[in-house]
Amino acid sequence: MNLNQNPELVELRKAVREFTNKEIKPIARQIDESGEIPKELIKKMGEQGLLGLYFPEEYGGSGFGKIGYCIALEEITRGSGSVATMVGAHQSIGTNALFIGGSEDLKKKYMPALTSGKKIAAFALTEPEAGSDVMSIRTTAKLEGDHYIVNGTKMWITNGEIADYLSLFVKTEKGIACLFVDAKSEGITVHPREKKLGIRGSVTNMISFDNVKVPKENLIGQEGRGFIIAMKTLEGGRLTIGACSVGAGKELLELSANYALQRKQFGKTISNYQAIQFMLAEMKVEIYAMESMLYRVAAKFEEGLDATEEASLLKLFSSESICKVADLALQIHGGMGFSAELPIERFYRDARILRIFEGTSEIQKSLIAHRIIKNKGVWNL
């Protein structure tokens, strides 16, 4: 797939790169240290159509689909992993759960405000006792008249305190369900943001629900079908991990190559030393492989084909690879890479979460192995 042959995608990349260079990179360190993304920046991203890239124009989206979304997220990540995480959580999981399973009435009612960035969404699945084990969620929703009454607790909710709406997964009498919930409803408590190793500017919160009333028409899909909606949403969300990994990798390679061309040791720039050259070569190999997988998987999603296994392959490989790339970049920069004076250590910290959220590396291995065994090892990608 040659993305350079599509003029619309080329222009999209150029526009998002310019936006990132102008609006995100200059404040990336501030975002990391303050622990939040300025509201003005979120507003600007909405105005630029960056918060609805994923979705069709009929719902207020930009109509660039999965491939356009990945290109844009690549470029945003080159500026800040925190900003990219906020965008991904809002778009590819928070809003996408509604898009995947919601009725036309629900989508037409809520999506235009979400795709324009006037409203922000979050994906509320994980609980204190239910992370990878989704079936063990304990948050309940009981139908009483024309409302569900929700009780329970969610944790590790990206965009928690800035979200206007939640795609909330609950347990009902018929099994797991997904509700689209107004995050400002009475009975919802958003706890203080988590202090994290990386992506510090992306707010993450625990959220409690105490007899929260949700209109029954805000049920996404059907009761008992919530697990399927969650899994389908997370499959698409794994494109986010791939795009973030590729974007971060490209930025780290560029920073490392330029540093190697400037830094002198023993009378010549370190770019002349084979040890450094080999590190740069290793970085590029990893990035090339990640990028190749990302757009192959994105294209399959775009065609409406089943990409369950491919999404897991992408998520596993890219999240592991970007950690290697970040480590090599830090090594090339030496002591300066370890210093907060340069962005390398921030990229290094931000990369580590990619092996955990949207399904841990271990969960991806289990999913992949299950497919291999089911298909008796026959290569069917």
Image: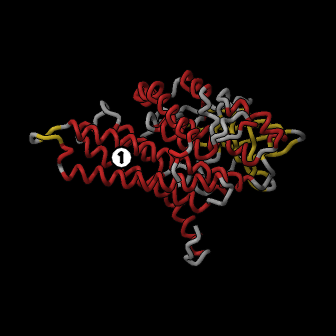
Q: Which residue is found at the position 56% from the left and 23% from the top?
A: 39
Spot the residue most to the top: 40
Q: What residue does disc 1 label?
A: 326
Question: Can you give x and y, in whole percent of width and height, for residue 359 in the image?
Answer: 55, 54
Q: Which residue is found at the position 34% from the left and 40% from the top?
A: 254
Q: Is 340 on the left-hand or right-hand side of 364?
A: left
Question: Can you give x and y, in whole percent of width and height, for residue 305 in the image?
Answer: 67, 59
Instruction: Pick the residue in front: 151 or 69.
Output: 69
Q: To which quarter of the image does residue 40 belong? A: top right
Spot the residue most to the right: 145
Q: Is 323 on the left-hand or right-hand side of 14?
A: left
Q: Which residue is found at the position 34% from the left and 44% from the top?
A: 253
Q: Which residue is found at the position 21% from the left and 36% from the top?
A: 262
Question: Can you give x and y, in whole percent of width and height, for residue 135 in the image?
Answer: 67, 57
Instruction: Pick the residue in front: 264 or 204.
Output: 264
Q: Is residue 73 above or below residue 113?
A: below
Give SS at disc 1: helix
Look at label 1 and name its amino acid: Ala
